[in-house]
């Protein structure tokens, strides 16, 4: 497939021929895709497949490549290859549409081999997930994140979600493991915030569902009540998941953990560590989407808490 995003640099330089080694000591490759992307090693796995560290032989830079893994043999309740493939193309479409959005991982290309798409994305060096950061702090006895840092991360994720909602894309799987934190050269190890994994995102109007009929899609513990009971996901559903994610970050546990196995309780456990962030968390976690605040109200409050004055 054609490259999605125009690259900068001297594209008149002829690309090196793909081989076991590119002459810079980076080989041997596990595989070369489209005579351009040399796969180096897996760096992550997920429900749909794995992510590889790779090398763009044409532009001579590291990239991340997402591979769709199709399991052989029918397993009850497991998605078939057609669903996984459709989801991968849907993710590529979503990321391409959001390539100018803040705090969204950049997609560079999509190539198709053996009937399956491979998504070529920016490699976010030094990244770790919000989930891993919080869990490491808890293991070290440091407690969860401070309210100010949690608000800063929440503001970045909100901007990414707002960009998607503006063009009709609902993420549907906002959670701590889908938020990357990485250095940006400022000295802060987690200065950069990136929302990832648009594999189950969908368009709000005119979209064809790539999910199985009557199947609840998303991650238990982070689903809005309307999703949990089979309703359609909306921007308000993403805001609920954002609230749940930020609650986990600042409290060190999920807000509905005590209600596991018996459905969602009428209200979350009151936040005890959130300080001034507690009010907005409680509002985001309202059971009814009609009672959750709009983007603008959340944006203003998070900006107040972080002291941000820019756009």
Image: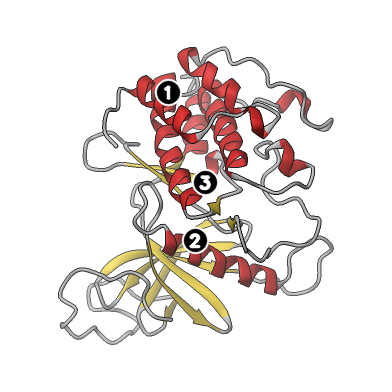
Q: Which mark is residue 94?
A: 2
**x, y (%) of residue 233?**
66, 47
**x, y (%) of residue 299?**
42, 31
Q: Which of the marked residues, 1 or 2, is nearer the chain's N terminus?
A: 2
Residue beneath disc 1: 301
Q: CA distance from mark 2 to mark 3?
A: 15 Å
x 31%, y 37%: residue: 191
Q: Which of the marked residues, 2 or 3, is nearer the chain's N terminus?
A: 2
Q: Secondary structure at mark 2?
A: helix
Q: Nearer the viewer, residue 105 or 31?
A: 105
Q: Quadrant of residue 174?
A: top right
Residue beneath disc 3: 178
Determine whether 265 is above or below 52 in the image.
Answer: above
So how many labels did they put on this image? 3
Q: CA distance from mark 1 to mark 2?
A: 28 Å
Q: For marks 1 and 2, give the one nearer the viewer.
A: 1
């Amino acid at each position: 497939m054609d490259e999605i995003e125009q690259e900068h640099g001297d594209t008149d330089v002829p690309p090196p021929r793909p081989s076991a080694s590119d002459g810079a000591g980076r080989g041997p490759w596990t595989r070369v895709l489209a005579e351009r992307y040399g796969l180096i090693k897996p760096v992550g796995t997920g429900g749909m497949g794995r992510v590889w560290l790779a090398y763009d032989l044409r532009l001579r830079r590291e990239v991340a490549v997402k591979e769709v893994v199709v399991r052989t043999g029918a397993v009850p309740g497991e998605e078939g290859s057609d669903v996984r493939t459709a989801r991968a193309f849907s993710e590529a479409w979503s990321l391409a549409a959001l390539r100018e959005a803040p705090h969204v991982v950049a997609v560079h290309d999509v190539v198709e081999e053996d009937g399956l798409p491979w998504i070529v994305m920016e490699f976010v060096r030094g990244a770790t997930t919000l989930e891993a950061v919080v869990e490491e702090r808890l293991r070290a006895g440091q407690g969860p994140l401070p309210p100010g840092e949690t608000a800063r991360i929440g503001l970045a994720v909100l901007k990414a979600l707002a960009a998607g909602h503006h063009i009709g894309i609902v993420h549907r799987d906002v959670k701590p493991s889908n938020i990357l934190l990485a250095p940006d050269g400022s000295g802060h190890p987690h200065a950069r915030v990136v929302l990832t994994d648009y594999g189950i995102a969908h368009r709000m109007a005119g979209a064809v569902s790539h999910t199985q009929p009557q199947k609840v899609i998303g991650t238990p513990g982070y689903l809005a009540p309307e999703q949990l009971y089979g309703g359609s996901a909306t921007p308000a559903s993403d805001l609920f998941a954002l609230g749940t994610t930020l609650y986990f970050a600042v409290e060190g546990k999920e807000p509905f953990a005590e209600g596991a196995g018996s459905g969602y309780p009428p209200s979350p456990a009151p936040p005890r560590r959130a300080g001034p962030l507690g009010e907005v968390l409680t509002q985001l976690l309202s059971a009814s989407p009609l009672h959750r605040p709009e983007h603008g109200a959340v944006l203003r409050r998070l900006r107040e808490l972080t002291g941000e004055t820019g756009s």
